[in-house]
Amino acid sequence: MSSTTIASSASRSAAPGPALWSSRLAFILAAAGSAVGLGNIWKFPYITGENGGGAFVLVYLACIAVIGIPVMIAEVMLGRRGRHSPINSMREIARQEGVSRHWKAIGWLATLAAFLILSFYSVIAGWTIPYIFHALQGNLVGMDGAQAGEMFGQLLASPFELTLWHSLFMVLAVMVSVGGVRHGLERAVTWLMPALLLLLVMLVGFGMSTDHFGTALRFLFEPDFSSLTAAAVLVALGHAFFTLSLASGSMMAYGAYLPKGVSIVRTSMLVAVMDTAVALMAGLAIFPIVFANDLEPGAGPGLIFNTLPVAFGQMPGGSFFATLFFVLLLFAAWTSALSMLEAVVKWLEEQGMARRKAAISGGLAAWLVGLTTVLSLNVWSDFTPLDSFERFEGKTLFDLYDFLTANVMMPLVALLTAVFVGWVMKKSSSEEELGAGSMHRVWLFVLRYLTPVGLVVLFFYNV
Ligand code: PHE
């Protein structure tokens, strides 16, 4: 469409302009790059392990389909309609709709969530870098569980090392972000996403060659509802938001660059399906190794860093596959971090900053806050400021950021978004973006009723 001409003239300049993705595919890669991240490869396998496998996976799939996709459609739509950063898109849409300007609070909360998540996401993503080096140097060969635990423990205990990797990761993200939509983000995802897929396919191939692929398949896909708890349902719902990059301004920011004429409904569905496929593939790559080595599927957040190195260290070609695995994790985290940064950087640009300055300032600020996460893993591990509240007893700053974003800010943003789009915005406005018809009616019904109810339950259960 004519938007391409506008985009190519704007993409070179640093001034905020209507830069757009060059194609539908570019948006799909960028949005899938945002969605596929530590959430899929690090978190999904361990929460599936902790929550008993098959039945949890089914509930998670239902949450993606019934709540995740409708909210994603809403966010991409708000982005495209607003054509600004999440904060100013919300302001703009509220103006168009003739409703209170205060609805831009959705944009503020979402951007703040993106900023906070980025600060600690960068620290965790940084862990992958030393593991790439360990794998390359063959340090994992012949390692036992105790040694793997020690390796991970040493990393976490060193503020210096953690800061180094956190800094390096943030520099990678800022470097791409400086290039802007076309020359930075789009170019990066066009390389990184196919590479990521290829690495994952190779790892699943390796999983298939082990004797335990069938066990992994059964673990992931044979539901045993007797092991499903109410808490697990809520974990699944919360994770559906995190893994699809919802409620954090990311999808809204990327939606702002979506050319008119691209079907938001079909594209969002495709992105969600890709994200889910990657999570399941990560499970199919990781669980055969876990079962083949008698490791504990419910080992928790350390599943990857504490146990997989042992497994890699024992398998033929393990150093090679371990390198692949940690590079994959790094790429996945990188393209996710870009989308969190975008929500912030775009807003800074709108305040009159040049793109380069905006990217560096946003990255620097998140990096500084990230240092408190680094310290909370070691020097400040006893600093648990909210001890006087029973709910937060023993929680470090990092734990608190994680709780605040995943369990408070994201559900709240998603709830406000559903209410805004479902009840406040005119039906004709969303029809303009999505097209009228039965699909639109089903979508609106879900946003009006199912999403708010699901979220209120999640919120009160968790807080
Ligand atoms: N979806 C990303 C993941 O699964 C995390 C993310 C959250 C990215 C919020 C952007 C915004 O790792």
Image: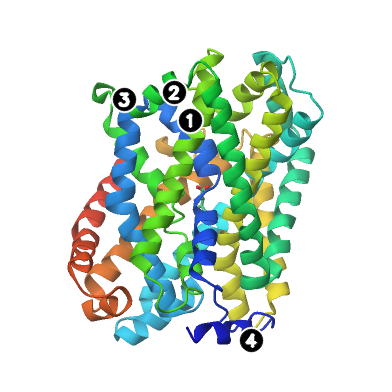
Which residue is tagged 1?
284
The amino acid type found where label 1 is placed reads: Leu
**Label 4 near label 1: C-beta < 8 Å?**
no
Q: Nearer the viewer, residue 42 or 364?
A: 42
Q: What is the CA distance from the residue labelled 3 to the residue labelled 2?
A: 10 Å
Classed neighbour count for the residue bearing mark 3: other residues with Cα under 10 Å, few (<14), some (14–19), many (≥20): some
CB within 8 Å, label 2 to label 4 = no
**Disc 4 residue: CB within 8 Å of ligand 1:** no
The quadrant holding residue 97 is: bottom left
Of the image marks 1 and 2, the number of the one nearer the N terminus? 2
Vertical position of residue 290 compared to residue 20: above or below: above
Residue 85 point in image, percent of width and height: 51, 74
Give the quadrant of residue 58.
Answer: top left
- Residue beneath disc 2: 216
Q: Residue at x 29, y 53 (%)?
A: 67
- Residue annotated with mark 3: 222
Sequence-wise, the earlier of marks 3 and 2 is: 2
Q: Is residue 380 visible?
A: no
Asked whether mark 3 and ligand 1 are closer than 8 Å, the reply comes as no
Residue 9: assigned label: 4
Q: CA distance from mark 2 to mark 4?
A: 50 Å
Q: CA distance from mark 1 to mark 3?
A: 13 Å
181 or 384, which is in the foreground?
181
Q: Give the mark nearer the N terminus: 1 vs 3.
A: 3
Crowding at mark 4 (Cα within 10 Å: few <14, some 14-19, many 20+): few
Note whether 214 is above or below 352 in the view shown: above
Q: Which residue appears at 67% of the width and 30% of the height?
A: 321
Q: CA distance from mark 1 to mark 4?
A: 44 Å
Sort mark 2 into few (<14), some (14-19) or many (20+) by Cα contacts within 10 Å: many
Q: Position of residue 442 (x, y in %)?
A: 19, 62
Q: Is residue 106 above or below residue 349?
A: above
Q: Earlier in the sequence, mark 4 or mark 3?
A: 4
